[in-house]
Amino acid sequence: MSTIEMISLLGIIAGLAIFVIMSIKGFQLVITAWVAAIAVILTSGQPIMEMITETWANGFVGFIRGYFLIMALGALIGKLMSDAGAAKCIARALYRLCKNSRSNQKFIASLFVPIMYVILCYAGINGLVIVFTVVGIAAQIMREFDVPWRFYSYGGVAVIACNWIPGSLAIPNIIAGNVSGSTLVGNLGLGLAATIVYLGITVVFLYFDVKRADRNGEGFLDTGAAYAQGIKPADEEAEPALPGLIPSVLPLAAVIVLAVFISLDILIALFLGNALAVVLYWKYLSSVKKSLGDGVTSCFGAVIGVGVTSAVASVISASAGFQVITRGLGSLPPILAGIAYIVVFSFITASPSGALNGVGPVAMDFFNGLGLSAGTSAKLLGLSTFTGVPPHSSGIATGVMVCKFEYKKIIGVYVKVPLVAGIAAIAACLLMIQFGI
């Protein structure tokens, strides 16, 4: 290892430490990512201004150019659903299922948030937008059945699976397809197997957590008292007029059918889904103009945040010290090396999209060397992002703020469940690849 590589490696470590510490301390993501990037750039062994104006800027602008419109249209359809009451209508349908269940009502009610998160994220709505769409309805239902409020965090855990579910319009799945040259479906068998394993383990964790909380006498108010002020009982009679269930789900279904089964361009599918939502929800929106404006602007923070984390990955990749990391990971078997790149960078940047956009091509070099198909590579890329919601994640910070959690009460779920379920899902897929399934 040369002196320049050693200094650069120390700079990378320092930059990553800064990123994690500032994130946990609650600094705004853009500031955190920029400070971390500067630490890496100053020790990179490369011309400083070139690293800023070209490497960093290209990493940032490249993400914005490629995915801003997709995220904006996804946020817009989520806002229209929220304002028109379509999301609430879907929630009411799930609520009636809970009420009609003769046993395990509390567990079934606890599944509401994971189910809503997966449905909405699968249709292309960003997780940072979903929380504002779901949280109010979730609070009513979880209070009605006295489900501990901290279990809302299982939504953020379950939604990770959308990074590889076949046909998902989640940004990481789109990026994985673009990087690998695959479709949104990719390797169908691997995607379905990984989804079943991951979500199955997540549901098992949730089931036993609910049972344990019930034995201990824990209810909604134990962790939800701060949020509970002003929540009214889930009384359907008191609700304003809502769209029917079919009109409520139709825009989401249309986007999925157009993008996945008809293979229409994702932007066109999302645009048509939004147009259909405006038509179907028109009479339920108090101000169409305000909903459209708020929907588009609601994605700005998420887009900029992912863009700057993608730029951090870009400057790290261009630094002299990255060669040391490359040699270290390169000593692993090729398929594990490719996975390790995404796992490490997803954790570091707390952004699956940023990691895939930044170092996805590096991982693909390993997969291509093994002769893996584009579909198989896409699923491996998506699966490797299971570490993308670490303790310093902006998603967790947003959840803590919006849901008024105590950080220490919910962080355990984000640590244990994705780690166990993610490793199990990858292991299942590697076995399938090994045996040619």
Image (cartoon, rainbow, N blue to C red):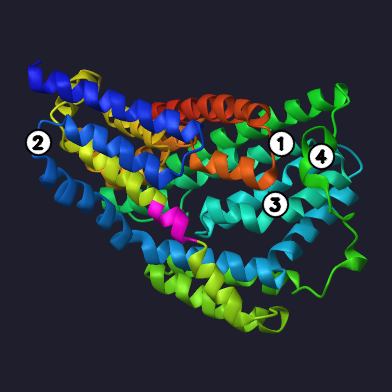
**Sequence order check, earlier mark of 2 and 4:** 2
Whole-angstrom CA distance, mark 4 to mark 3, is: 14 Å
Q: Which residues are magenta?
A: 299-304
> Quarter holding the N terminus?
top left
**Callout 4 secondary element:** helix
Q: Which mark is residue 135?
A: 3
Most common secondary structure along the magenta stretch: helix
**Callout 3 secondary element:** helix
1 vs 4, front mark: 4
Q: Which mark is residue 151?
A: 1
Is residue 336 in sight in this rendering? no
* Vertical placement of residue 407 versus 32, above or below: above
Q: Residue at x 69, y 63 (%)?
A: 87
Whole-angstrom CA distance, mark 1 to mark 4, is: 14 Å
> Quarter holding the C terminus?
top left
Displayed quadrant of residue 415? top right
Per the image, the residue denoted by label 2 is: 46
1 vs 2, front mark: 2
The disc labelled 3 sits on which kind of residue?
Answer: Val
Question: Is residue 236 shown in magenta?
Answer: no
